[in-house]
Image: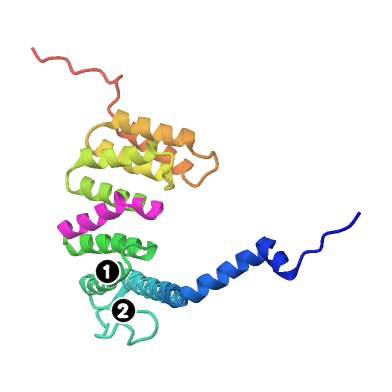
Amino acid sequence: MGTTKLTRKEIRSVDPVRETIVRLVGFFQVNSGKIGIAVIVIIALALGFWAFSRYMDSRAAAAGAMLGRGMVFFSATVSPEAEDDPFAKGDTPFFKSDEDKYQAAAKEFSAAAGSFGAGEAGKSAKYYLGLTQLRLGNNEEALKNLESVAFGSGSRTVAFLAKQALANHHADSGNAEGAEDLLRGMIKDPKCNLPKEELGMQLARILAAGGKTDEAIKVLREASESSQIFGSYNQLLLTEIEKLQAAAPSDETPAEEPQP
């Protein structure tokens, strides 16, 4: 049986791989200008993304540095012998007054929050800025900053710390109900990673100050029951319960007889 030989022209006409390659070569020849522009655009986008990432990293680093400097100022030592330069005596800063150190801290926290407000450093800076503003008596601005952190997106821990700071402020300013709501919400929230025992003691003090002694004792007992037996808070809770029980009026005390 004879075999049929195909000529080179016939082989080329039925070769699918060659046909595809020929089409691709033709496409690139016809559209070489457009392809070159597309490649340039892709390279430009990649470089832009890289530059933007570097820029954001540099801003985050700067915000972190300002946050750290602000925290150092916030806890700095006050001395009447301090000079205008807080670092005049070395690496440890000294200020002439509390107002001076809080003003310096607020400046750093404000810069950090403005430089990278959406990042973790920015959220922490806004929280500390709120605390500093409370110390300076700028309550309106302080509450705005603390509320934006407490009820906004960002670090969960910082958000709960901001809520705790708000509860303290509400209690100090006479808004016991607002303080109670915040603290009860955090105690019941399974996502709250602050010590529930500490929150319970804070809530109990507010309740006791408002004359709700029985409710305060109940809060402390619940906190004690959920606390570790040999935990650092257990003895504190028991001590608080004993103090409230001792101060509470006894139901067994006989009532005074009416005078004739």
In this figure, what is the number of numbered marks?
2
Residue 100 inside the magenta-drawn segment:
no
For disc 1, the neighbor class at 10 Å (few under 14, some 14 to 19, many from 20) is: some
Q: Residue furthest front?
A: 2
Residue 257 quadrant: top left
Q: Position of residue 69 (x, y in %)?
A: 35, 74
- Picture residue at 43% right of the left edge, 78% below the top: 33
Q: Position of residue 79 (x, y in %)?
A: 28, 77
Residue 24 quadrant: bottom right
Residue 109 quadrant: bottom left
Q: Amino acid at mark 1?
A: Gly
Label 2 secondary element: strand
- Picture residue at 39% right of the left edge, 39% below the top: 189
Q: Residue furthest bottom?
A: 88
* Residue 114: image tag: 1
For disc 2, the neighbor class at 10 Å (few under 14, some 14 to 19, many from 20) is: many
| The C terminus, quarter of image | top left
* Residue 88: image tag: none
Give the alpha-carbon distance from disc 1 to disc 2, as whole Å: 26 Å
Q: Is residue 60 above or below residue 217?
A: below
N-term mark: 1 or 2: 2
**Residue behind mark 2:** 94
Q: Amino acid at mark 2?
A: Phe
Residue 75 vs residue 236, the one in the foreground: 75
Residue 259 vs residue 84, the one in the foreground: 84
Q: Residue furthest left?
A: 260
Q: Position of residue 73 (x, y in %)?
A: 32, 73
Q: Is residue 240 above or below residue 118?
A: above
In this picture, which residue range is highlighted in magenta?
Answer: 139-159
Secondary structure predominantly adopted by residues drawn in magenta? helix
